[in-house]
Image: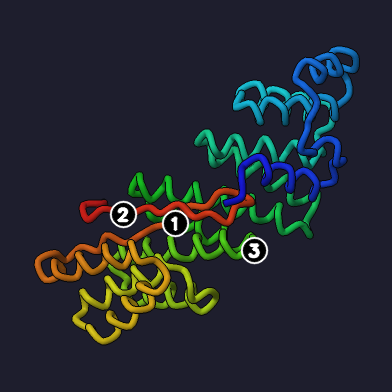
Amino acid sequence: MISHLLILAIMVLSLGASPAAAGQNPPPLMRLKQAVAANPQDPQAHYALGLKYESLGKTKQAIGEYQKVLSLKPDDAKALYSLGRLTGELGDSGKSIELHKKAVKLTPDSVAARSLMAAAYNRQGMAFMAQGNLDAAKEALEAGIRAKGGAVETEALRNNLGCLYVRENRLDQAIGTFREVLRQNPDVPQAHYNLALIYYGQGDYQSASQQFFALKGIDHKMAGELSDFRFRIESSPDYPVKTMLTFPGSQALIEGSIPSDYK
């Protein structure tokens, strides 16, 4: 799994920072503080200090330094990305999206930039789903898809849109959406799982079995969960579909589930 710090280094390099700013052996914290004190109007000095704070898990201090960068240089794409990412991780998806929008305008050809924005929309959509605001969730997820981020983010957005259709009992749309996920990438386990749940519920055991065996070859643990559930499907009309969350720049997917009593 790609580490968070390595992802951060890759992002900084892709957005134009020098190798020294994103290297494996960054300057000590004290030296970076001294650089800021000596050059308080230098946005790059504040940005380097922000990166160091972030690497140490000092999110509040990192945010403060990125904000100082933007006060000195409002069109600094790196600071916009970094501040947007941290803001989103702290739960303010709306603010995160606005920051990413500004950054994407500065670097419209950057897939990494669009992926960060898509992931922010995904977080916002999932938050709205948890609140039961399905209209707002749908709007956020569709906006994330239109952002045209990386494959991982788009797969998660489409899968979650399919889950939303399930909650609305629009099963034909859900099936079509999950199938589109698998057309793009046949190895997304959540889409196989969700399709199988729907087919079991509809009594289409042949189609459900096809999805089950495909899932078994990809994610044995998830296939075991599906196997347990299929014996209860006749006594439960609910579909505990699996949602997906992504972290910007990472290939790692975090599994989630919408419980059967989800409203």
Q: Nearer the viewer, residue 216 or 128?
A: 216
Quarter of the image where one finds residue 20: top right
What residue is shown with label 2? 258
- The disc, 3 or 2, on the residue closer to the chain's N-terminal end is 3
Secondary structure type for disc 1? strand
Secondary structure found at label 3: loop
Mark closest to the chain's N terminus, 1 or 3: 3
Q: Residues within 10 Å of mark 1 (few under 14, many from 20)?
A: many
Q: In the rendered image of this protein, does residue 246 appear above or below residue 90?
A: below
What number is the disc on residue 148? 3
Q: Residue at x 42, y 77 (%)?
A: 176
**Image coordinates for residue 69, horizontal then vertical, percent:** 79, 28
Q: Residues within 10 Å of mark 2 (few under 14, many from 20)?
A: some
The amino acid sitting under disc 2 is Ile
Residue to which mark 1 is pinned: 244
| Left or right for 69, reference 120 | right
- Residue 8, located in which quarter of the rendered image? top right
Q: Is residue 82 left or right of residue 154?
A: right
Task: Please provide percent x and percent y for residue 215.
Answer: 37, 72
For the point 46% across and 68% down, the residue is: 188
- Between tags 3 and 2, which lies in front? 2
Could you tell me the amino acid type at mark 1? Met
Answer whether labels 3 and 2 touch (C-beta < 8 Å). no
**C-alpha gap between disc 1 and disc 3:** 17 Å
Q: Position of residue 191 (x, y in %)?
A: 41, 69
Q: Position of residue 6 (x, y in %)?
A: 68, 44
Residue in the foreground of this view, choosing between 60 and 70: 60
Residue beneath the point at 45% across and 52% down: 254
> Spatial distance from mark 1 to mark 2, Cα to Cα?
10 Å
Amino acid type shown at disc 3: Lys
